[in-house]
Image (tube, grey):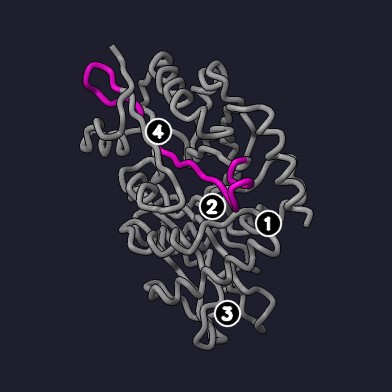
Amino acid sequence: MSKVVEIQSVDKLAWDGLVRTSSVASWFQTREAYDFYDGLSFLEAFALGVVEQGRLKGVVVGYLQKDGGKLKQFFSRRAIVTGGPLLADDLTEEELVLLLDALKSRLKRKAIYIETRNFNDYSPWRPVFERCGFAYEPHYDIWVDTSTMEAVNEHLGKSRKRDIRVSLRDGARLVTQPSLEQVREYYAILLDLYTTKVKTPLPSVEFFEKLFFIASSAFLLVEYEGKVVGGTVCVGLEGQSLYEMYACGQDGVFKNIFPSELATFAGLQYAAENGCPRFDMMGAGKPDDGGYGVRDFKLKFGGELKEFGRNRFVCSRWLYGIGKLGVKIMKRQ
């Protein structure tokens, strides 16, 4: 008889074992990820497991997020399951229904919607998600082969290689073991980017300061003339994938220095040298986002476009509609 259990009742060794064997495993569904979310003051972490006759068959890890002041927080409450749930390959439809229904019951009064942001192929389970009210929305991801440095260099275009070579020749330096103060310098650049161009919420500096001490994280920064000018922030699941969470650079500011390109290359190199055969560049927009510049930039590193999509359950239709309108207004300002 299958049952849903709270995270405190999930056997830790069984959880680790499911991460090793599941074809849809990601770092974001590990114990380390849950502990990281749970330690942040501005997020509320959640996690549930489904057990069948004592065997752990699925885990869903996520967090509740909201932005701004009290009014904005009320209209921006959402539950995010980054990477998608962790599922055993022989998980039954009934077990997945049980897990998703428990997730909805637990979060329906706390979130306006629940969204899984998939980094693997969940198509075999898509009908079950839809039966449980989780509508599918196409969304791109990008995977780069980092099984070897030879593979990395083979897929890099000539212009990328040139920009990286020139940047290093003219004084840019990769910092693979930065100080916490350098991480804060990097955050200032990232915050400016999100405030002026991206116009979507960026976690507070606390997120980056605490991630800095996570064993699976990698802060790969670019320094020029003694100052941080860009970098990438990654987390890795050994033997599987390195995930690029945030990347930025002060591009066009210094002659012959291309911080964003050098930062992403540093991530590819780190993955190849640390047992991660895949570099997951994460979000690459919706298929109908024809002018999505971030996707164009990422594809220049030789990655393969993947369409794993997102699954979204709306808990409150009218609040969801108001929230979508608010996002559109914010991006136009």
Q: Residues within 10 Å of mark 1 (few under 14, many from 20)?
A: some
Contact between labelled residues 1 and 2, with CB atoms less than 8 Å apart: no
Residue beneath disc 1: 199
Is 8 located above or below residue 175 in the figure?
above
The residue lying at 51 percent from left, 63 percent from top is 153
Alpha-carbon span between mark 2 and mark 4: 22 Å
Tell me if 269 is positioned left or right of 162 in this view: left
Closer to the camera: disc 3 or disc 2?
2
Q: From the top left corner, tell me how far across and down residue 37 is, in percent.
A: 39, 48
Q: What label does residue 167 carry, if any?
A: 3
Q: How many marks?
A: 4
* Amino acid identity at mark 4: Val
Q: Which mark is first along the chain, 4 or 2?
A: 4
Q: Which mark is first along the chain, 3 or 4?
A: 4
Alpha-carbon span between mark 4 and mark 1: 29 Å
Residue beneath disc 4: 60
Q: From the top left corner, tell me how far across and down residue 213 is, in percent.
A: 33, 62
Alpha-carbon span between mark 3 and mark 2: 22 Å
Q: Which mark is first along the chain, 1 or 2?
A: 1
Q: Residues within 10 Å of mark 2 (few under 14, many from 20)?
A: many
Q: From the top left corner, tell me how far across and down residue 178 is, in percent.
A: 40, 74
Q: From the top left corner, tell me how far across and down residue 108 is, in percent.
A: 51, 27
Residue 162 in sight in this render: no
Residues drawn in magenta: 51-74
